[in-house]
Amino acid sequence: MRIEQQVIDQHNQKLEAKHRRAFNYISEEVSDVEALLEKVQQFQIAIPSWALGTGGTRFGRFTGKGEPSSLEQKIEDVGLLHALNKSSGAISLHIPWDIPKDADKIKDLAASYDLVFDAVNSNTFQDQPGQEYSYKFGSLQHVDPTVRKQAVDHNIEVIKHGIALDSKALTVWLADGSSFPGQLNFREAFQNTLESLKEIYKHLPEDWKMFVEYKAFEPNFYSTTIADWGQSLLLANKLGDKAYTLVDLGHHLPNANIEQIVSLLLMEGKLAGFHFNDSKYADDDLTAGSIKPYQLFLIFNELVDGMDAAGIDHATGLGWMIDASHNLKDPLVDLLQSVEAIKIAYTQALMVDRKALRAAQQANDVVKAQEILQGVFRTDVRSIVAEARLRSGGALNPVGLFEEAAVRTKLIEERGSNSVATGL
Ligand code: PSV
Ligand code: MN
Ligand code: MN
């Protein structure tokens, strides 16, 4: 299904008067609202193909209805999101879950929804039917070179799919590690991983990047071979200019200061981008901004500061993606909520008075620094984000329109209630 512009316009007309009041008020509070709006309009957050179905836990999965069961339907879903919010203009594929049989056709279909392809993701954390060697004891780190080669070849294959789709990056997330002391020689596992990544790196086209994602633990519970930003950065530095560290918000040990990590990675020119989600405990993959919205704002505060210092374009300089999956909510609604939370945090970060903050820091004025940051964080900027969406042709209230237009009911009618998505 597609949401007609006319449906969006009618929805907007109903909300316009109330929106105008809120927007006019905030416009007077902000110094250059037009410049702000332009940046917010440009900011796009990619949707991973694996977030379109209901997520599960190791205790079970309660599948939703009318989930996308093919790559074409996944593109259709992201097209729906983008029509509503005008901020989800890219999709990130996971191979082999989403192998495009005819890349040109798939590209055309995506373009018809105004979508492009974000980073492609390899999968060496599961064994696939017919696969020769098992990844039970790791992939790129494996003690057996034949297993490593199989994993390297898979990544090269993923790059080829990405080239056909005009993707510009490969994201490597490994489940490699160990679950018991003594199982692994840490140095050997790291060296094997580095050598394998070097092989993959050789196959990256000139204008591509490699995103090395880290994760503290799970599915391995004693050690993970790329466990933190230091280990990822070590690899990225050894690999070369095209390799970067990818930060997934849920992949840290509790209370990690992610904003500080981001700031230093940016300073080193090695920040790849983000997988946004939120968590209370670990890799919970909850809706971005649903648990720790202040942290999300503080991260964006560092991003805006660091990107401006390095002259990096906000919209295109880094990879922005959601990486979440849920058991409870309709995945599409959840993604709309995540995008909204991310755009709110970004907008607030743009509003920080950097000169005043710098002056407070230089004067060791701790109170003033806190006042500046919290003053912005406590400002309701929802009408700015909504105005940006309106100007781009999106809905003033995407979640509201999703319900009003009975999107899920229509998808169930089209796809059937037993349609289940592949994914994590
Ligand atoms: C597993 O933790 C994970 O959520 C990683 O964050 C990856 O980015 C994603 O799966 C897809 O492989
Ligand atoms: Mn991730
Ligand atoms: Mn994860």
Image: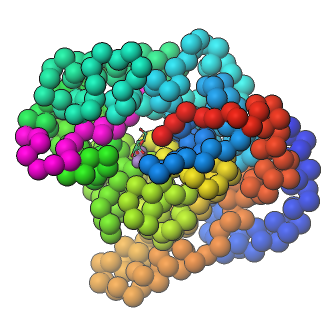
Residue 1 shows in this picture:
no
Of the pair 244 and 206, the residue shown nearer to us: 244
User: Is 373 displayed left or right of 419 in the figure?
Assistant: left
Q: Looking at the picture, how far across and down is residue 194, in whole percent?
A: 17, 32
Q: Quadrant of residue 347?
A: bottom right
Of the pair 416 and 2, the residue shown nearer to us: 416
User: Is 189 displayed left or right of 352 in the figure?
Assistant: left
Q: Looking at the picture, how far across and down is residue 14, in whole percent?
A: 92, 59
Residue 329 shows in this picture:
yes
Q: Looking at the picture, how far across and down is residue 323, in whole percent?
A: 49, 47
Q: Quadrant of residue 105?
A: top right
Q: Looking at the picture, how far across and down is residue 188, in whole percent?
A: 8, 35
Say which residue appears at 47% left-offset and 76% top-offset: 373
Q: Is residue 178 magenta?
A: yes
Q: Is residue 66 magenta?
A: no
Of the pair 344 and 81, the residue shown nearer to us: 81
* The N terminus lies in quadrant: top right
Say which residue appears at 37% left-offset and 73% top-offset: 358
Check the image and report above or below for 162 versus 361: above
Q: Quadrant of residue 235?
A: top left
Count of number-bearing discs: 0
The residue stretch that appears in magenta: 168-186
